[in-house]
Image (cartoon, rainbow, N blue to C red):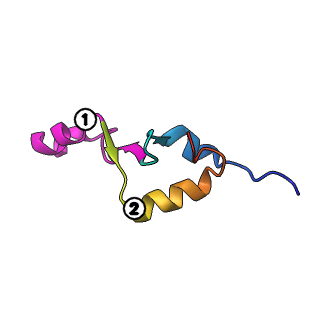
Amino acid sequence: MPKMKTKSSAKKRFRLTASGKVKGSAAFTQHNLRKRSQKMKRKARGGMILSDVDARMVKSFMPYNRGK
């Protein structure tokens, strides 16, 4: 059986925490920030934990990173 491939886009954008949750960054933070409220920009700093549904999809893209 050949090995499954990891999606390159997923490994660049997401990290798994020690407890197995998926950490990513908030959307809409790259450009046109003058339109966004200060509250939105402040909340988008740092990382965020993905919801369970999204995390399940991202984990399927990274089959060999589950236990790390």
Q: Are marks 1 and 2 in contact (CB under 8 Å)?
A: no
Specify the farthest residue to the right.
1
| Quarter of the figure with residue 38 | top left
The amino acid sitting under disc 1 is: Arg
Element marked by disc 2: helix
Q: Position of residue 25 (x, y in %)?
A: 36, 42
Judge from the rendering whether residue 42 lies leftward or rightward of residue 60; answer left or right: left
Farthest top residue in view: 46
| Residue 52 tag number | 2
Q: For the residues marked 1 and 2, what is the alpha-carbon distance in whole angstroms?
A: 21 Å
Q: Which residue is drawn at 31% across and 44% down?
A: 48
The amino acid type found where label 2 is placed reads Asp
* Residue 43 visible in this rendered orientation of the protein: yes
Describe residue 39's horizontal placement relative to residue 48 as left or right: left
Q: Is mark 1 on a helix, strand or loop?
A: loop
Q: What stretch is highlighted in magenta?
A: 22-46
Q: Mark 1 points at which residue?
A: 45
Foreground label between 1 and 2? 2
In the rendered image, residue 35, in percent from the top left (x then y), is placed at 18, 45
Looking at the image, which is closer to me, 46 or 29? 46
Q: Where in the figure is residue 49, as x and y percent of width and height?
A: 34, 48
Residue at the spot 57% in from the left edge and 48% down from the top edge: 66
Q: Quadrant of the C terminus?
A: top right
User: In the rendered image of this protein, does residue 3 appear above or below residue 15?
Assistant: below
Percent across and percent down for residue 18 are: 45, 39
